[in-house]
Image (spheres, grey):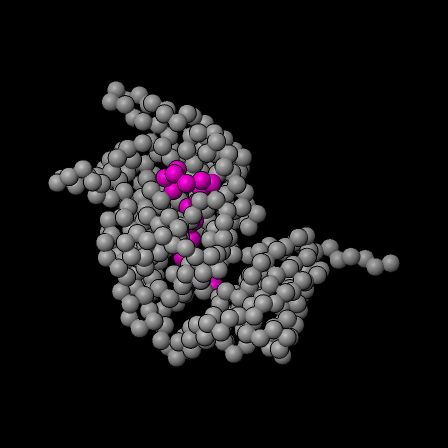
Amino acid sequence: MRVKRCVAVLTEEQVLNILKKIKAPDLEQSIVDLGLVRDLKIQADNVSLKIAVAQAGSQEQMQVQQEIVQALKQAGAETVGLRFEELSEQDLAALRGQGNGQNQGQNKFPSLLAPESKTVFIAVTSGKGGVGKSTVTVNLATALQRLGKRVGVIDADIYGFSVPDMMGIDERPEVEGEVIHPVEKDGVKVMSMGFFVEDNSPVIWRGPMLGKMLKNFFTEVEWGELDYLVLDLPPGTGDVALDVHQMLPQSKEIIVTTPHTTAAFVAARAGAMALKTNHEILGVVENMSYYPLPDGSKDYIFGQGGGEKLAANLKSELIAQIPLGQPNKLESDDRLLTGIYPADSLIGGLYSSLAETVVKKTTN
């Protein structure tokens, strides 16, 4: 009688770390770093995944297949299901160019996705739009910078980018050869799809193209040394959110909701996705919690309890309750200057406390 092995279930993070040691033929880079690992799924001790290759059915494919199966089975996988897809000529040329550039020393800066990177990734997400996720992103990033941290922001809400406008940025990134330098505003480095779109034109792209643009933000941008990279994710659990979960297996997450129970119910989906992909939820931020009245009392315009209920459902904690309030204005007219709250304001102080909480939770 055959006795089945008793092994620990592999996590997505463990699988990706194993696969990082396997190089793509002719490219001399990890299949993970090149984004060639697709549709990774783990059920009990069974691992299935899709690998993009230059030519299906080739000797190179067989070589990669054997390496992947052997490595995962040695790590405890009972079965390994592999599928392959061919890269387009355009994708293959881009990958070869990326590999050649690194081999020739054109891109000397370290990738944020490199295993030795010390950057802490914080994804700010929500279940639905309109809850102030981008406001939380830019104010958290600014508050971390005020604490002396080296901070970057990726506006990964590619369809609904708003970070440049909220931070008062009207310039574009500088490009030197194949290297992109992020825009720096008040000590925070920023990359956004908004920098590459003219006149607020709509972005009509499918998921794979969005994933490539997002990966470029990590691999082709000279970020320098960062302590924190804060990502403003699109709401929900679509393609871009999934790409981030696969690219950043060790990312932390902050879930943003309003006090309304419906918003909290929808936000639970984003939290569930984080838990299923082994992302650590740092906590829940309840935005628009109340309106502070002149007499010191609070008007709970959108109700109460949504953030606490969401935190309880996710077995996390409510780490901030941010009231309604307007940031600075230009003196000349009524347009908002930025979406950043001054450090000495009520809301700015709350973001400072949030940043201190984040640092405490992410410091060993």
Q: Is residue 283 depicted above or below 201 in this figure?
A: above
Q: Residue furthest left?
A: 332
Q: Is residue 319 depicted above or below 147 in this figure?
A: above
Magenta highlight range: 115-133
Q: Residue at x 24, y 22 (%)?
A: 294
Q: Is residue 123 depicted above or below 128 in this figure?
A: below
On-image quarter of the N terminus: bottom right
Name the image quarter holding residue 219: bottom left
Q: Is residue 354 visible?
A: no
The image shows residue 333 at horizontal and vertical percentages of: 15, 39
Name the image quarter holding residue 176: bottom left
The image shows residue 91 at horizontal and vertical percentages of: 47, 70
144 or 288: nearer the viewer: 288
Q: Is residue 124 magenta?
A: yes
Q: Residue at x 38, y 54 (%)?
A: 203
The image shows residue 94 at horizontal and vertical percentages of: 44, 72
Q: Is residue 92 left or right of residue 66?
A: left
1 or 67: nearer the viewer: 67
12 or 217: nearer the viewer: 217
Q: Is residue 165 left or right of residue 82?
A: left
Q: Residue furthest right?
A: 1
Name the image quarter holding residue 288: top left
Q: Residue at x 55, y 57 (%)?
A: 13
Q: Residue at x 34, y 71 (%)?
A: 178
The image shows residue 8 at horizontal and vertical percentages of: 67, 54
